[in-house]
Amino acid sequence: MTAPQPLHLAVALDTVGWHPAAATGPDAPGGEIFGLAHWTALVEEAERGLLDFVTLEDPPKRPTGHVEHRLDSVLVAAAAAARTEHIGLVPSIVVDHAQPTNVARAVATLDHLSSGRAGWRTPVTPARPIVIADIFTPEVQTPMAELFERAADLVRVVRALWDGIGDEKALRDLAAPGRFAPADPEPHGSFTEIEPLGGAAGDWITIDSPALAPRAPQGHPLVFTLAHITLPYRYGARSADVVSVTPHSTEEARATVEEVRSEQEAAGRADEKVHVFGDLVVFLDSTPGKAAERKARLDEAHGSEYTSDAHIAVGTPAEVADLLQEWQEAGLSGYRLRPGALPHDLHAITRELVPELQARGAFRTAYEAGTLRGLLGLPVPPAPDAL
């Protein structure tokens, strides 16, 4: 029997932690959460633990840990790039109204500043809150499908811009008519004479767009997405390099991986490497029962039991390591861990969980590549003129 490949690990950093009452913890960071030292210390700690990458959350309309405000995640990632050498940096840019040229330039710039360690998390935000009971109704599925179609178009155009494709017609043909550029009935006509279709003129790709950064060190920086059901699975299988999913059992993990792989094949990417990670919220302590007690105190401060879209893993490093390896056998190649409270659970990941996995031969003992794609075993896409 072939031994499983070492796991990949990432952490999702969001202000003071993922529990809504994380700010009330005894070692919770104070007002310095909007300062450079707070963020660089977190990313440096993740790098000390040899993690593959961090995602920097920038979620609209979702207060976390009683913190309502957010810094710009791309700028935070750029600052962290100057203080780190190996770990990947994956800020969030919401795709709903993003302009392809702006996204392409920002993420490529981060890739240059970090010497090839940049990525892009691609969250979408429905116009109205979704009631879970209604999620599979046509009234929800139809606009959701349009959201993910737009996201797929955006990623396709951004990848073309990273490849240096600047021809307006070629870029326009990559997306739905009117999506990012006006539909042009006269290919040689003036763009200024065309009526807007499908969005504000500011969303168009235009020939006088700001100059893009040179081709990024990774060619295409990493594209990451979080997915819960079929539509985002399909989008991730078509567009992303890492699709992180939210199973709550080994059986769910196996079924979800199979669905993503099926969507990947349908998208014509069966021969490409696409990682399927699992998202987990973690509360970790080396003393048995202590993590559960700590979560219970945070629940009491919050006024109700904390629940999440992702499975909540509460226990010792050994117990959580058992879970990670069990779900790896179901097909997951890595995990994005959400620390319940910062900095405690981040330190527990890097200083206790990682050594536990290393002792089992399940995680690296040194960084083995200089770029994020290299760490994840993803090839650098060739430039168009090299094809």
Image: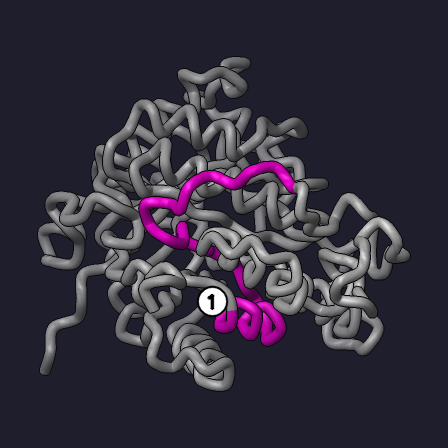
In the displayed structure, would residue 307 be above or below residue 149? above
Q: Which corner quadrant holds the C terminus?
A: bottom left
The picture quadrant where one finds residue 185 is: bottom right
The amino acid sitting under disc 1 is: His
Image location of residue 202, percent across then percent down: 77, 44
Residue situated in front as seen by the camera: 267 or 8: 267
In the displayed structure, would residue 87 be above or below residue 310? above
Tell me if 221 is positioned left or right of 71 in this view: left
In the displayed structure, would residue 183 be above or below residue 32? below
**Which residue lies most toward the front here?**
188
Residue at figure coordinates x 45%, y 42% from the top left? 108
Which residues, given as a range, are shown in magenta? 209-238
Residue 306 seen anywhere in this rendered image of the structure: yes
Image location of residue 176, percent across then percent down: 72, 69
Residue at figure coordinates x 56%, y 66% from the top left? 228
Residue carrying label 1? 248
How crowded pointer 1 is (Cα within 10 Å; few <14, some 14-19, many 20+) is rated as some
